[in-house]
């Protein structure tokens, strides 16, 4: 395994080299003036203070090179949610504490996620699209946390890259790329976007309607920026208080976006209501049947399916067949003709 280390501090590089040099092939350089080639590098470890504008600028300058590296681990101050979000906005595929143990770092570096696909040119294109999507989603989270304005056009561009990738290479390859290179909330949002796009393609929707789908998917979980990472990434079942906090994210997302003139009422509706069910048992508003838009119904099915099949460190991805059976069991909550139309997406694409 070829690992490249980048840091803003010589001492940090020395510590990391001491942890890893007996287990892998190592190269390293200081962030100031870094020229990461990306060629023949399996994993990148970045140890830098992301409160520094100079460090952020330096990482942005080499973002194209970073995006070619399959695994990008950033070591940050976990007490700062903004630093964690900033790391993802700069292209991290994983974020760890700034002081990991040797075993923790090796475990993350050696984490081999299941994949039935060999490396290919199309996979590299998928990785680039996923990189752009994850960076965009992380930038949105950072804007919510800092009180800044979300760049809707950047979201549109990232969503279109994902749509083009799924249309060209298929859903299965998109799912494999995302599950192999991304984690947590960012993995989920990327999966939902790809699944919603493929659902739209299978239904033969127009390009305008496909854009509505990928924009809705990119925005739908923006309210999770307000939920503590310890809860979002908890390895196990949430208790009742934690569940109640997570269930505030649709309303929080709506509140974060409603003042942005570039966000349409339709997008606000999807963000607020993607956890509503036809029988009124959903949240936050307990909407029923005709009160739930068609776009929201499609996004809800995509969202549930993505949550079931996503990869987590503490649980394997559920087989797509089993996930579809669960959707079929939700009669009364989901629109069954849509679930039927989703069958090909779930099982054959």
Image: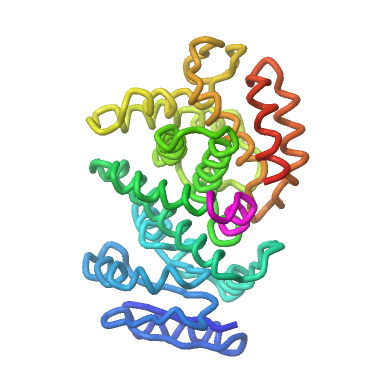
Would residue 142 be found to the left or right of residue 218 on screen?
left
Quadrant into which the N terminus falls: bottom right
The magenta stretch spans which residues?
167-177
In terms of depth relative to the viewer, which is nearer, 48 or 98? 48
In terms of depth relative to the viewer, which is nearer, 136 or 162? 162
In terms of depth relative to the viewer, which is nearer, 305 or 223? 305
> Which residue corresponds to the image point at 47% horizontal and 51% vertical from the top-left?
164
> Taking the image as drawn, is residue 327 in sight?
yes
Where 101 falls versus 257 (above or below)? below
Provide residue 75's location: percent of width, then percent of height: 44, 67
> Which residue corresponds to the image point at 66% horizontal and 44% vertical from the top-left?
236
Q: Main secondary structure of the magenta part?
A: helix
- In reply to whether residue 173 is colored magenta, the answer given is yes
In terms of depth relative to the viewer, which is nearer, 251 or 158? 158
- In reply to whether residue 202 is colored magenta, the answer given is no
Task: State the image quarter where residue 249 is shown.
Answer: top left
Task: State the image quarter where residue 192 is shown.
Answer: top right
> Taking the image as drawn, is residue 223 in sight?
no
Where 190 falls versus 32 (above or below)? above
Provide residue 232's location: percent of width, then percent of height: 52, 43
Where 63 falls versus 182 (above or below)? below
> Which residue corresponds to the image point at 39% horizontal and 79% vertical from the top-left?
6
Provide residue 63's location: percent of width, then percent of height: 35, 68
Would residue 31 be found to the left or right of residue 295 on screen?
left
Q: How many marks?
A: 0
Provide residue 83's location: percent of width, then percent of height: 35, 57
């Amino acid at each position: 395994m070829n690992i490249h280390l980048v840091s803003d501090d010589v001492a940090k590089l020395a510590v990391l080299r001491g942890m890893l040099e007996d287990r892998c092939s190592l190269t390293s350089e200081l962030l100031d003036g870094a020229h990461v080639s990306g060629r023949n590098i399996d994993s990148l470890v970045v140890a830098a203070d992301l409160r520094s504008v100079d460090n952020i600028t330096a990482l942005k300058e080499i973002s194209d090179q970073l995006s070619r590296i399959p695994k990008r681990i950033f070591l940050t101050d976990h007490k700062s949610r903004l630093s964690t979000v900033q790391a993802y906005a700069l292209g991290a595929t994983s974020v760890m504490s700034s002081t990991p143990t040797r075993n923790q770092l090796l475990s993350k570096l050696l984490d081999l996620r299941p994949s039935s696909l060999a490396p290919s040119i199309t996979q590299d294109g998928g990785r680039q699209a996923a990189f752009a999507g994850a960076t965009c989603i992380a930038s949105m989270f950072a804007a919510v946390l800092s009180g800044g304005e979300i760049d809707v056009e950047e979201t549109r561009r990232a969503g279109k890259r994902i749509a083009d990738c799924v249309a060209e290479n298929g859903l299965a390859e998109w799912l494999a790329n995302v599950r192999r290179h991304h984690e947590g909330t960012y993995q989920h949002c990327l999966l939902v976007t790809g699944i919603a796009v493929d659902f739209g393609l299978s239904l033969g929707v127009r390009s305008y309607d496909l854009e509505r789908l990928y924009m809705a998917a990119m925005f739908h979980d923006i309210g999770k920026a307000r939920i503590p990472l310890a809860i979002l990434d908890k390895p196990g079942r949430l208790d009742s208080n934690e569940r109640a906090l997570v269930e505030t994210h649709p309303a929080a997302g709506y509140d974060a976006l409603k003042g942005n003139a570039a966000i349409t009422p339709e997008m606000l509706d999807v963000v607020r209501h993607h956890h509503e069910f036809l029988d009124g048992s959903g949240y936050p508003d307990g909407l029923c049947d005709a009160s739930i838009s068609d776009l929201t119904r499609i996004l809800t099915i995509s969202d549930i399916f993505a949550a079931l099949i996503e990869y987590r460190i503490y649980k394997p991805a559920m087989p797509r067949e089993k996930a579809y059976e669960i959707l079929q069991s939700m009669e009364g909550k989901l629109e069954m003709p849509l679930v039927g139309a989703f069958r090909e997406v779930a099982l054959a694409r």
